[in-house]
Image: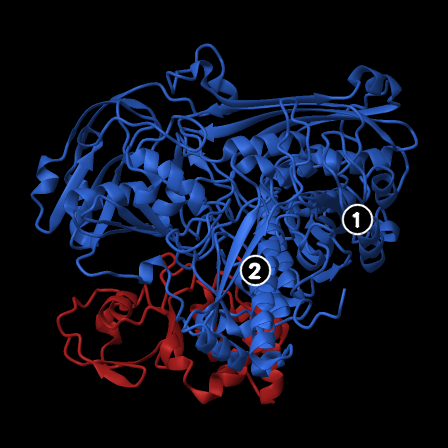
Amino acid sequence: MTAPIRVNGRPEHVDDVAPLTPLADVLRDRLGLTGTKLGCRAGDCGSCTVLVDDVPKTSCLVPAGQAAGHDVTTIEGLVGQPEHAALLAALRRHNASQCGFCTPGIVVALAALLRDAGPDGPTRDDVRAGLAGNLCRCTGYESIVDAVLEAAGEAA
Amino acid sequence: MSARRWVGQPVPQTDIDAKLAGATRYIADLTVPRMLHAVIVRSPISHGVIRHVDTSRARQVPGVHAVLSAADLPDRRFGPYGEDWEVLASGKVRYRGDEVAAVAAESVAAAREAAALVTLDLDELPAVLDAHHATEPDAAQIWEHRPGNVANAFEIARGDLDAGWAQADLVLEDTFTTNRIYHAYLEPVGVMAEHHDNGSFTLTVPTHIPYKARLTYARALGVRPQQIRIVVPPVGGSFGAKYEMLEPLVAAVLARASRRPVRLVYDREEDASIARPRPPFWFRHRIGLRDDGRFVARETRVIGTAGARLFWSPSVLATAIHRVDSLYHFHAMAGSGHLAYTNEPPTTAMRGFGNAESLFGVEQLIDEAAERLDLDPVEIRRRNIVREGETTLHGWHISSSQLPACLDRVAELSGVRERRGAGEGAGERGTTGLRRGVGLAVAHHVSGYRPILADYDGSAAIIRAGGDGRVTLFVGEPDIGQGQATVFAQIVAEGLGCRPEDVALHGVDSALSPDAVGTLASRATTLAGNAVEAAAADARAKLDRFLEADQGEPIDAGPDGFAEELRRYAVGHCGLPLLGEGVHRPPTQMPNAEKYGNPSSAYPFAAHVAEVEVDTATGQVRVVGYWAVHDSGTIINPSTARGQVLGAIAQGLGWALMEDVTLDAGAVTNPNFLDYRIPGAGDLPDGVVVEFVEGEEPNGPHGAKSLAEAAINPVTAAIANAIHDATGVRCRDLPMAPERLWGLLQQAPAPRDREEVTV
């Protein structure tokens, strides 16, 4: 791997990593970014969702070599960005997390969903569709949907 | 009761910022210097004699520090219920997945490589793959100490059953089956073990019952309990699966052998392959009623599957047989059942704990009785439910109940009385089309259960409030993601005069926290909550005494002045933090030899209505509306309480319609989230209505009692009753998946498809 991976805005040189190593392992084991959780390593649960060039991806299925030269945003980078403050505050108000293991991946997916929503913001169905790639066993999703709509309403 | 400042408020969870930011560190996020990675070698066959386990080639893999089989360990059997656990299988393997050998290596890859080089010389034996066949004379014997493969049995009888049946105008009897459900927590099982030079261990384990687990682990490792320190990290979901696990022992023996810390984290496939699911049950339920709808007798026979070793299935069985007698007055009953050993993955506790399984059948029979007797489903339940102040058949004392009000409210919200039988949707019964129906079910549960631990049933709490203004709470009941830290913080804030966000619940650590029964049987809010309330009162009283002596008058500066009060206290005590201790001794009884006695402090209740749309062409069921009304006494946090109910409904819906751990020749065939589907956001109805009818539970902290298990208990039955209302078909087996329902729709277009027994 020649080009660095830009992770949360910082170039990370991980030349010694085998190109097929899952990006999630590089983030967690090499860079210590353990906010990216591994729930299945098969792209089914969404706990490891990160943004690659602003698009949500399950980082367990992205080979590190493919991320070289690209921008990767993890939950650690995302929580510091002011444009997501309303989303985080709404999730907090709605207690939209229980055990919390799936939560970072869901926050990343929702951040992208809100950014891509039109000027009217997403509908409840849009939010549910946007969560199709993320499993949560605790909440039943309803508090998450409520929080996203509230955050979108504030932004509008 | 004076006005409450924090109890009853929807405050944000005290740990939610860390969870949202990905800063909560679960076991797989924890590393320690020199840590090794463990991999388990499992039996590839269901049943067989172990001739030899050859670890010699595995030991030569670079980076490998220990490879163990039973030959390297003392011959010890132990376990929470029987002497049927071993750290690694010796003599025989008893299911596909049984732990036979284990490797610790510098990397997961090296450990996997070595594990693949362990060779097993096994003589295959006939396997028992069915609980009903297990107890037949020709079935293979799985454990020598349990001939006939009966792992555990439970029997109870009360009242004059013959007289009861003699009074019955209508007797309904049917068979119901409930299935294996994978807990499907998002965090796969993981543990870490460290072995110290003095022979002691530190085990980092996401257990909910650390005190009891420590006793089991001490026996297994041949050390005194004091030589094991158990540290509970944040738990990424459990729902009963992570009570008392075998994995910490595998990591512990590897740590002892390698003299290095060892972490063992499953991948999803391994986790779901051994699964340790909800035990599947076969029920034969029989109930007798007079023609005014009053119950006069019931009998239940239950057969369950323990799998190859006993985890917590025996308590689940007992619950499945007799807990319903504290929801309804049946006046006379007999219940019996057993768990069969099979050569299948062991089964264990899951939210609902046998009560949910039992109610799937009982609530359908009651619905059917209502139809036969032309009573509405609310009324037949109202005539039979236990009431506040009553003592039930087995001596359980119902200190509070708002179930009648819950029934009224859920009927009002959902319109179930008017809409049931209305035949909404297109087409006639038995024809192709979308059919809508509504179904009601009620439920209850416990708040703690006296028989869990012989020593005591209560709880203890310690508060440490330092001069820096930080309040740390120690209890022995771990938060398993259900929001307990926040509920406790609200109780502390109420009594101590700080804010909830000032209070941090310390992760359970056996070196610091009180001993405890643990977080199970829906007991933590009620029992530990009382201890927390007492500890806060104790600390506040000490603080007030000091301030009064120091200032000459009592001062309560409120939350804004709290840090300053603590600073003064510490200065006045040469640095000693303010300490509060609380003990709660509940008014419960250990049931006697006849299983009579009140085992729980408080009983929560729920009334649910589901509305479904059934596609009669495909058997596909969509839940399109859901109403849940609960009595959990005072609601300490309406926001997190609502979250518990919504999550329980989602799990119940998955169980009812989607989920099933399937086995082929003893091997799980769907050990991943693609084939074992749990509900996603699109599978659940929008706008679920959750309400609470708040009473005051005299035995609970601030009048509160339990919630989160009561919330899953009625779900499968409410959906089943709604399906019947929509289609006329009774589905008596879980899951009510499209292929099963479609089959029923083909063979049974008539609303009555079963024999009526009239006495």
Chain that bears disc 2: B
Q: Position of residue B603 (x, y in %)?
A: 70, 45
Tell which circle, 2 or 1, labels the residue nearer the N-terminal end: 1
Near mark 1 (Cα within 10 A), the count class, few <14, some 14-19 or many ≥20, is many
For the image shown, how many numbered marks are present on the structure?
2
Which of B147 and B447 lies nearest the eye of the viewer?
A: B447
* Residue at (18% x, 37% y) in the render: B68
Q: Position of residue B405 (x, y in %)?
A: 83, 53
Q: Are marks 2 and 1 in contact (CB under 8 Å)?
A: no
Chain that bears disc 1: B
Q: Which residue is mark 1?
A: B403
**Residue B126 visible to the viewer:** yes
Near mark 2 (Cα within 10 A), the count class, few <14, some 14-19 or many ≥20, is many
Which of B337 and B505 lies nearest the eye of the viewer?
A: B505
Q: Which residue is mark 2?
A: B535
Q: Label 2 vs label 1: CA separation?
A: 32 Å
Q: Quadrant of residue B170?
A: top right
Chain corresponding to blue in the figure = B
* Residue mark closest to the camera, 2 vs 1: 2
**Residue A120 visible to the viewer:** no
Instruction: Kindly identify which numbered label has been placed on residue B395.
Output: none
Chain corresponding to red in the figure = A
Q: State whether residue B250 is above or below residue B628.
A: above
Where does the N terminus of chain B fall, quadrant-wise? bottom right
Q: Does residue B132 appear left or right of residue B159 in this picture?
A: left
**Which amino acid is tagged 2?**
Ala
